[in-house]
Each structure stands twice: as structure tokens, then as C-alpha cells.
Image (cartoon, helix red, strand yellow):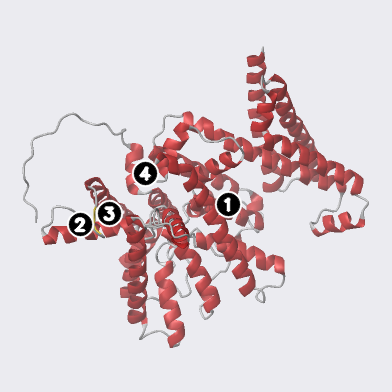
């Protein structure tokens, strides 16, 4: 009997969760008549009754009720908070202070306050149920690459449906499905290529969806779910840990939970600092503090996640002469592009050195490679842009230095710009293409072939030219499988860019430099454009969408996801030499 009731409650809860999601989408995504909204509020009340009843029924059926309460403390805390909200609204509704507070939130009636309180509760419960679905996903026999493919595709699909809602646009009209798919893919893959202006085309609701997708894509969907499960006491099982270990490229099984925690803490801390700084430097640029905060929040998240989405119609061109804005964005972009493993290693090593603890204070080989490559590319890129654009730029010497520096930073997958990309000369555009192809570092919020991949490839070339049997970097030998993966990533990346460039060239009949720039920008999840993206045909948009998706998850990950599981063989064929070169 106990099992039957538990199964029945579980099925009812699944139906209630879908009904709750549909109710929220109907109320916030569509323009509903007042009479319909009254019925939907009754549906919300029914959903709350089901959610609350589920918790108390399971508590009554639990053999260890104290253990059940401990494991589901957040559920009962939400129920308690919801009850307190309703009671407070009922008894303090006549208070002038409460009335003034509700008026500031544009809540004009007690009924509307009840509705908002109910919807906040429903949204919180839906988030908890989404985290609990993590256990279901872990039961699927998926490899890490297949899991990455599934989560990103699912997020893009849901984001597309939400952007198709009438309330997502400023005009109240549903946007074309291809444009919605393009925007959702660009946001989730933290690319920044756009087919419509983000600030003017989308409503606050639509911009909120884009911002949420950016945050999901930047942190990593599985990382966010796993962190939430840990915080809420759900925990992550052995299979989830094994999958996350492969997704996060962690060598040690025990490092998964600390690494996830560091990813979330680093992201939240850096974005919060970015919001504070931008709120300060933009204090006189907007009419109200609330607008300033909103713009600071959107651009801080977009910059740290290397997304490149901007609410300004000219990206950051209007701030090209403002070092405070430029350096704030550059700092967020660089930190986000270094990778969470590098930042964690730097923080840990610095902390141990301050304490005088030599054990664990050494920077890993990966960290040293990323730091050296990032600094080298930043300096060489800035020098190249400054030299190639010096003759034809109307800017002063100081502004030219600032523009060259920021262009070198943003070309490594950020997508913001303080100068029109269409105004760059062909040689400068080729330099930017190279920087976009290399991209950011592994484990970060950017894309591209990654700095460490190029470093290993260059070290391989150096070893071959010197006649050395091993590939070496910083007095360390690079394993053969890493070298093979680096070569594979570069070749697959070049192949993907070649195919997309050929296809779009045939469809659009545009100069090769323009097409190549857009394709590499899409592959590297950069978002810089020379003006071609917004004028693409539907077929070309679909090609760019595919390129962004493959570029974000990585061509090697894609190959492993659609290929068979790796199998060790107990044999080897005879070797025979082949003439090369």
C-alpha cells in the first residue's frame, strides 16, 4: 500500500509540475484577458495544494520521519515561508508601510500580492524538481560527451520556445522561429551573434530569458544543477560524480564537488564585483539607479561569461574613450576566459604561499601554459591591431592604444567591441580571425580551439623540428594522448569552419573575408561581426546556428558523443612506415 501511494503521488506530482510550468508561461508569456487570469490563479492554488500535500503525504509514509525532514528541509522551509507571506499580507495589508512597499513593486491589490507570492512559491518548487531530475538523468546510460550534447540541446530548445512567446518582444508579436532559435543558441553557447537588436527588440521578459541562458551556458548546466543539489542536501551520487569528472576534465574523482563549488563561487563573486563597478561608473549615464543596476547586471554577466550580448545598439562603441568602462569589461572577459581550474589553482597557490605552506603552492602545468599563452596572445594581438590600423584611424594615440588592447581581449571569444568590425582593414580582420580561432582556455566561459591546445600543437612542432622524441613544455613531458587530441581538435575545427564557410559563400555570394569572419566568430563563440549576420538567409542562419553549437560543445566532444564507446583492444597491427612531406 505504501509503495502504491508513493507511486501515485509521484505521478500526480509530475502532472502538477507540468501544469505549473504551463500556468506560469501562460501568465507571463502571453497577453491574457482578466477573466482567464482569474481561472489561472485558481489553477495556481490547486498546484500549491498538490505540492504541499505531496510533502506531508511522503512525510506521513516515511519510516524515518526525522530523516525525511532533514533531507527535505528546503521544501518545508518554502512551505513555511509561503504561509508567513500569506499571513503577513492578510494582517498587515492595512499598514501604510506595507501598502507603500507594494505600490513600489506595482502591486495595487491584495489579490495580486497573493498571486505573486503563490507564483514565487511555485517557481521555487519547480526549481527544486528540476534539480531532483538530476537523479533521473544520471540513470541514463550516457557518456560525458553525450550528456554535454543533451543538456545544451535541451537548454536551447527550451530557450527557443520561451523566446517565441509574445511577451518576449517589445512589440508583443512572436518573433520568427529561426530568429528565436538563433538567439537562444547564441545565448546558451555564449556567442553573442545577433539577428535582432537585443536592447530594443526584446522586452524585459525576453532579455531576462537571454540573460538566464547566458548564465546557464557560461557556468555549465550540469555544474549548476549539481551545485544546487549539494546545497539543498540532495547530494550527487557516484555516477553523477563520474559523469561530472569527465565533463569538467578533472583528473581526480574527489575534486568534483570542490571544483563545482569553486565554479559557482568564482562566477557569482566576479559578476557581483562587475555589477558594483559598472553601477558606479554608469551612475550618471542613466535616469534611475534601478536602470543603472539592471544594465550593470546584464553586462557584467554577459562579459564574464564571454557572451558579448549588449543592450546598447552599438555594443560598447559609445564608451570607446572611457578607460573605466573598457578596463572593467576587459577584466571580466579575461578572468572568465582563463578557466575555472586556473583561477582555483591561482587562488589556492596564493593562499598557501601567504601561509608559508610550500605543499600545494605550485602552479600546475596547465595553469602556467594558460597564463603564458593568454598574455602572449593579448600582447601580440594588441600590437598587431595597433600597427595595422595606425595609419587609417581617426582616434588619438591614447584612444588607439585602448582600442587595440580591447580588440585583442574581446577577439578571444568575448564579442563586445569599441570599434566597428566592418571598418577594420583586411589584414587586421585576418589577425582577429586568428585570435577568434584560438579562443579562450579550457574550463572557462569562452570557446575556440583553446590556448592550451595551440600551446601543445606548437610544442609538438618544436619537438619535431629539434628531433626530440617527446613533446615537452616547462620541463614536463606531454602525454601522447594529449598531443593526439590537440591535433584532432585543430583539424576537426578547421574542417568545420571550412565546410560552413563554403556553404555560406555558395548561398550568400559575399566576399570570402566577410564569410570567414562570421564563421570563425560563430565557431569560437565570439560574437564579433562585420555586419553580415543580420542579413543572412534562413539557410545560412541555420548553418551559423550549427557552427555555434558545435563550436561551444567542441568538435572532439561531438565526435565522441555520436561515436561508439571507447573499447580497449588486446591486439595491435604490424607497424609500417609512411613517407611524409
The answer to whether 548 appears left or right of 28 in the picture is: left
Of the residues under marks 2 and 4, which one precedes in the sequence? 4
* Numbered label attached to residue 460: 2
Cβ–Cβ under 8 Å for marks 1 and 4: no
Q: CA distance from mark 3 to mark 4?
A: 23 Å
Give whichever of 134, 509 is nearer the camera.
Answer: 134
Q: Looking at the image, which residue is at 66% across and 54% down?
A: 172
Residue at disc 4, secondary structure: loop
Determine the image quadrant of residue 398: bottom left
Determine the image quadrant of residue 230: top right
* Numbered label attached to residue 463: none
* Numbered label attached to residue 251: 4
Determine the image quadrant of residue 33: top right
Q: Position of residue 30 (x, y in %)?
A: 69, 47
The answer to whether 516 appears left or right of 130 in the picture is: left
Q: Is residue 330 above or below residue 44?
A: below
Q: Residues within 10 Å of mark 4 (few under 14, many from 20)?
A: few
Cβ–Cβ under 8 Å for marks 2 and 3: no
For discs 3 and 4, the disc positioned in front in the rendered view? 4
Q: Residues within 10 Å of mark 2 (few under 14, many from 20)?
A: many
Q: Is residue 463 above or below residue 60?
A: below
Amino acid at each position: 500500500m505504501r509503495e502504491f501511494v508513493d507511486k501515485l503521488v509521484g505521478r500526480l506530482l509530475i502532472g502538477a509540475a507540468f501544469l505549473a510550468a504551463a500556468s506560469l508561461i501562460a501568465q507571463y508569456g502571453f497577453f491574457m484577458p482578466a477573466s482567464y487570469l482569474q481561472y489561472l490563479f485558481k489553477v495556481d492554488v490547486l498546484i500549491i495544494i498538490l505540492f504541499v500535500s505531496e510533502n506531508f503525504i511522503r512525510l506521513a509514509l516515511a519510516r524515518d520521519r526525522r530523516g525525511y525532514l532533514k533531507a527535505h528541509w528546503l521544501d518545508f522551509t518554502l512551505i513555511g515561508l509561503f504561509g508567513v507571506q500569506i499571513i503577513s499580507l492578510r494582517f498587515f495589508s492595512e499598514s501604510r508601510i506595507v501598502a507603500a512597499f507594494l505600490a513600489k513593486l506595482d502591486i495595487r491589490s491584495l489579490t495580486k500580492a497573493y498571486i505573486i507570492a503563490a507564483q514565487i512559491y511555485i517557481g521555487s518548487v519547480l526549481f527544486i524538481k528540476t534539480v531532483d531530475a538530476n537523479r533521473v538523468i544520471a540513470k541514463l546510460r550516457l557518456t560525458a560527451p553525450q550528456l554535454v550534447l543533451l543538456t545544451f540541446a535541451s537548454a536551447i530548445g527550451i530557450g527557443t520556445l520561451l523566446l517565441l512567446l509574445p511577451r518576449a518582444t517589445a512589440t508583443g508579436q512572436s518573433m520568427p522561429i529561426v530568429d528565436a532559435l538563433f538567439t537562444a543558441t547564441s545565448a546558451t553557447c555564449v556567442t553573442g551573434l545577433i539577428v535582432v537588436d537585443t536592447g530594443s527588440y526584446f522586452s524585459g521578459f525576453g532579455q531576462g530569458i537571454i540573460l538566464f541562458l547566458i548564465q546557464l551556458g557560461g557556468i555549465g548546466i550540469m555544474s549548476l544543477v549539481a551545485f544546487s543539489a549539494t546545497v539543498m542536501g540532495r547530494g550527487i551520487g557516484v555516477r553523477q560524480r563520474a559523469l561530472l569528472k569527465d565533463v569538467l576534465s578533472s583528473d581526480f574523482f574527489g575534486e568534483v564537488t570542490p571544483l563545482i563549488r569553486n565554479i559557482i563561487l568564482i562566477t557569482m563573486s566576479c559578476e557581483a564585483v562587475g555589477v558594483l563597478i559598472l553601477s558606479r561608473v554608469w551612475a550618471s549615464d542613466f535616469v534611475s539607479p534601478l536602470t543603472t543596476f539592471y544594465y550593470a547586471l546584464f553586462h557584467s554577466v554577459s562579459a564574464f561569461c564571454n557572451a558579448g550580448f549588449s543592450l546598447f545598439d552599438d555594443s560598447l562603441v559609445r564608451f570607446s574613450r572611457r578607460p573605466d568602462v573598457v578596463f572593467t569589461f576587459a577584466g571580466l572577459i579575461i578572468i572568465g576566459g582563463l578557466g575555472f581550474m586556473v583561477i582555483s589553482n591561482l587562488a589556492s597557490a596564493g593562499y598557501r604561499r601567504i601561509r608559508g605552506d610550500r605543499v600545494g603552492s605550485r602552479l600546475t602545468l596547465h595553469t602556467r601554459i594558460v597564463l603564458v599563452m593568454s598574455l602572449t596572445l593579448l600582447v601580440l594581438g594588441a600590437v598587431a591591431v595597433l600597427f595595422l590600423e595606425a595609419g587609417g584611424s581617426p582616434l588619438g594615440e591614447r584612444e588607439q592604444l585602448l582600442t587595440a588592447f580591447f580588440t585583442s581581449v574581446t577577439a578571444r571569444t568575448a564579442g563586445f567591441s569599441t570599434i566597428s568590425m566592418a571598418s577594420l582593414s583586411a589584414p587586421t580582420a585576418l589577425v582577429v580571425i586568428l585570435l577568434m580561432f584560438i579562443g579562450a582556455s579550457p574550463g572557462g566561459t569562452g570557446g575556440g580551439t583553446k590556448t592550451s591546445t595551440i600551446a601543445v600543437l606548437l610544442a609538438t612542432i618544436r619537438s619535431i623540428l629539434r628531433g626530440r622524441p617527446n613533446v615537452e613544455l616547462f620541463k614536463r613531458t606531454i602525454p601522447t594522448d594529449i598531443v593526439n587530441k590537440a591535433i584532432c581538435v585543430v583539424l576537426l575545427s578547421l574542417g568545420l569552419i571550412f565546410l560552413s564557410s563554403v556553404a555560406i559563400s555558395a548561398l550568400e555570394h559575399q566576399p570570402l573575408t566577410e564569410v570567414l569572419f562570421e564563421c570563425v566568430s560563430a565557431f569560437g563563440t565570439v560574437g564579433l561581426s562585420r555586419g553580415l549576420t543580420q542579413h543572412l538567409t534562413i539557410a545560412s542562419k541555420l548553418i551559423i546556428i550549427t557552427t555555434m553549437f558545435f563550436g561551444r560543445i567542441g568538435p572532439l566532444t561531438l565526435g565522441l558523443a555520436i561515436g561508439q564507446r571507447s573499447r580497449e583492444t588486446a591486439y595491435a597491427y604490424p607497424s609500417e612506415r609512411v613517407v611524409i612531406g
